[in-house]
Amino acid sequence: MSRRVSLARDRADNVKRNEVKKKLKIALVSAVGLAVGPLAQAQNRETGDALQFRVGAGVERDSNVIRAPNKVSDTVATASVGARYDKQISLQRILLDIEAATFKHQDLSSLNYSTLNYNAAWNFAITPSFRGVLSADRRQNRDITNATGGVTESFIRTERNEVLKGTYTTGGGWLAQAGMGHRQSISENPRSLEATPSVNSATFGFGRESPSGSSLIGEFRHGKGSYDNVGVGSDFTEREYALVARYPVSVRTLIEGRIGRLDREHDAAPQRDFSGTIGSLRASWEITAKTRLSGGFSREWGSYEFGTGGSVRANRLFIEPVWKPTEKTAVRLRYQRETRDWDVPGGGTIDTGRSDRVNTASAAFEWEPRRNLLVTTALRSERRSSNVAGFDFNATILSLGARFTF
């Protein structure tokens, strides 16, 4: 009897010891998991797919490729190749994006052109209170919409911007900003808005931002520049005063705006001077998980370099709803109305007193059959009415394209 009791006691002790060992093992594995888990995740972030490549191809049918009253239709083939690098390293984020594209016309080969666009930015933070950005971007496109009509050659516009900007914030939300930048625009059409200015600027700002993301900042920019295709009177000085605001109405609604005044004075050619109100307002609303609505208004004021000079005012209004019926599809609609008014002194060119109205409407359907493949088809309508004879046009463009990312 005593032997049975002893054996039962031994078995009970073994069970207890095994349970204790099991608990210790679970605790040890959990502790190792807690220690190694964040490191493994950090390693995954560091070795993630930060570099991506993409290729694209498409075709479009344009009912009026020369943008003239007498339509000339053509088929345009497009091809592009690009790369993107996006990396977050501690408080620093590095973004590099570059794309080369070519456009080939079936009949009017004189309209063929190629573009090279890039965007590079280093968003840095030296301390939690001091952050900044060093960026450079370049955009190229065919400059035809608001300059001339009936052209049978491609006028390419190239715009470049380089910026270095720093922001210092205090514990109470107050901030101070300072930066410098270079902006250059080169259009092969001298009658285009802001055809060839090159400006070096210094910017200063002061304001406040809240933890919710809203901010209000006053800015002042002083710039010195010149025009590439203007002889005497090409040098100018400009000053810009602006108020910049950002207000997240809710988690799903955001309003951003900027209003200011631009003054540009030319030392040796006062007839080229101009000044006026500039600004923009944009709102975005995520109505549901599948629908989004955005819209905005902008006002620009720029130089007219042709002839004796002058200025051009441009107002642009747009609305853009987006609907995603499924995770792999999206429907995008957009309507834009733009007005441009020329102020050309002396009456030396056909653009004296010119006023244009351009309406653009588009509908696009996007389909993502695979995670790295996007297929898009779109229909776009462009219509311009002008008070100058020979500048009215309307065009309809039907396009189909695909982009593969790897």
Image (spheres, rainbow, N blue to C red):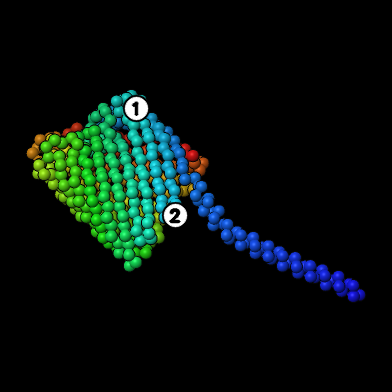
Q: Residues within 10 Å of mark 2 (few under 14, many from 20)?
A: few
Amino acid found under the numbered disc labelled 2: Ser
- Disc 2 marks which residue? 90
Q: Are marks 1 and 2 in contact (CB under 8 Å)?
A: no
Q: Residues within 10 Å of mark 1 (few under 14, many from 20)?
A: many
Task: Name which residue lies at 37% across and 42% down.
Answer: 363
Q: Can you name the residue that lies furthest to the left here?
A: 346
Amino acid found under the numbered disc labelled 1: His
Horizontally, residue 379 falls left or right of residue 221, namely right
Q: Position of residue 76 (x, y in %)?
A: 36, 30
Q: Can you name the residue that lies furthest to the right here?
A: 1
| Nearest to the observer: residue 63 or residue 174 | 174
Disc 1 is placed on an element classified as strand
Image quadrant occupied by the N terminus: bottom right
| Whether residue 287 is situated above or below residue 57 in the rendered picture | below
Residue 280 is labelled as none
Task: Name which residue lies at 22% across and 52% down.
Answer: 221
Q: Position of residue 342 (x, y in %)?
A: 16, 42
Disc 2 is placed on an element classified as loop
Task: Name which residue lies at 24% across and 29% down.
Answer: 151
The quadrant holding residue 136 is top left
The quadrant holding residue 155 is top left
| Whether residue 66 is situated above or below residue 32 in the rendered picture | above
The quadrant holding residue 384 is top left
Q: Can you name the residue that lies furthest to the bottom here?
A: 2
- Disc 1 marks which residue? 105
Q: First in sequence: mark 1 or mark 2?
A: 2
| Nearest to the observer: residue 118 or residue 383 | 118
| Nearest to the observer: residue 126 or residue 213 | 126
Q: Position of residue 81 (x, y in %)?
A: 41, 35
Task: Name which residue lies at 22% across and 46% down.
Answer: 200
The answer to whether residue 375 of the structure is visible from this angle is no
